[in-house]
Image: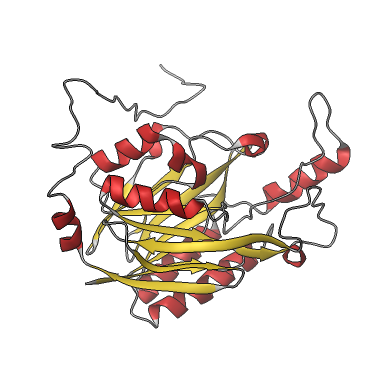
Amino acid sequence: MFKVAVVQAASVPFDADAATSRAEELIAEVAANDTELAVFPEAFIGGYPKGTSFGTAIGTRTDSGRAEYERYVRGAVALDGPEVARLERASAEHGVHLVMGIIERLGNTLYCTALMIAPGRGVVGKHRKLMPTATERLVWGFGDGSTLDTMDTAGGRVGTVICWENYMPLLRQAMYAKGVQIYCAPTADDRPSWQSTMQHIAIEGRTFVLSSCQVITRDAFPADHPVEYEVPGGDILMRGGSVIIDPAGRVLAGPVFDEETILYAEIDQDAKVRSHLDFDAVGHYSRPDVFTLTVNESAAESVRFTR
């Protein structure tokens, strides 16, 4: 058996140092429960600025919106920065594999990224969100096929697909083809309908699905941070709904709404083996004579210097 945890907790928006400290505390907590893999929510370090427009509308920008974006950038992290090094040390100290949602700063662009960190090996993989959803495109760049990484653990191969990327059938198929056995879905989607998506993916991919979402309230943000859109939850900007599901679609833990929690489950990869008796999306149920998928895993660089 391999014990996993899904962390449903509030981040510290726009404060990378404080958010990393919060992550370190939570890593220690899951380690005390003999956990070998912990999945954190989307944008846990850096923050998910729900309800904020950054002062934009079609054809117009505001100075206050640019100032708000500056604060967001300063709260993001670089892969070679001190925050990621602290996460690597925490992973090594406690012997816990991590899937950690961050806002990554690369040059002058931000990416919504999920890091995969292995004890003693550090960052062994990353996934930059390929398709930011709706107005997320204002503040996040587009990932490319070079970051469809996976991480091998004693409990199986781990892969990560972020939030509404999970509605992209071809991306899911690519992850199944990579042999993902533990399918991690950090998200900001706290709707009850998200549960149906996670259950479908578990059954479709015959994978364990671990989905993690924050529970965060309006007062978690700085007092001068504008939340311009009135979200249905009032002061609760994100309600959670984290869940763990097995390859047969059975819910092992969660979902939990409106409170911080850590969900735990023990997973047995033999359950995945048994589930493939009658379905394998990239094997005996795939019909490659009719359908094929080509995945471009090369880095999409806008400028290349040659000599």
Residue 40 visible in image = no
Residue 92 occupies quadrant: bottom left
Q: Nearer the viewer, residue 88 or 23?
A: 23
Residue, x 73% and y 53% (percent of image)? 231
Q: Residue at x 87, y 43 (%)?
A: 64
Find residue 137 and report its image quarter: top right
Q: Residue furthest top?
A: 307
Relative image position of residue 206 (x, y in whole percent): 25, 50
Quadrant for residue 139, please give it: top right
Outermost residue toward the bottom in this view: 32
State how the image is colored: secondary structure
Q: How many marks?
A: 0
Q: Quadrant of the N terminus?
A: bottom left
At x 32%, y 28%, the residue is 295
Residue 38 lies, in percent from the top left, at 40, 66
Q: Position of residue 180 (x, y in %)?
A: 27, 49
Query: Along the line of sight, which residue is nearer the eye, 136 or 289?
Result: 289
| 74 relative to 11, above or below | above
Residue at 21% in and 37% down: 282
Quarter placement of the C terminus:
top left
Q: Position of residue 40 (x, y in %)?
A: 48, 62
Viewer can see residue 31: yes
Q: Nearest the camera: 74 or 295?
A: 295
Left-right relation of 49 to 274? right
Vertical arrangement, residue 53 with respect to residue 119, above or below: above
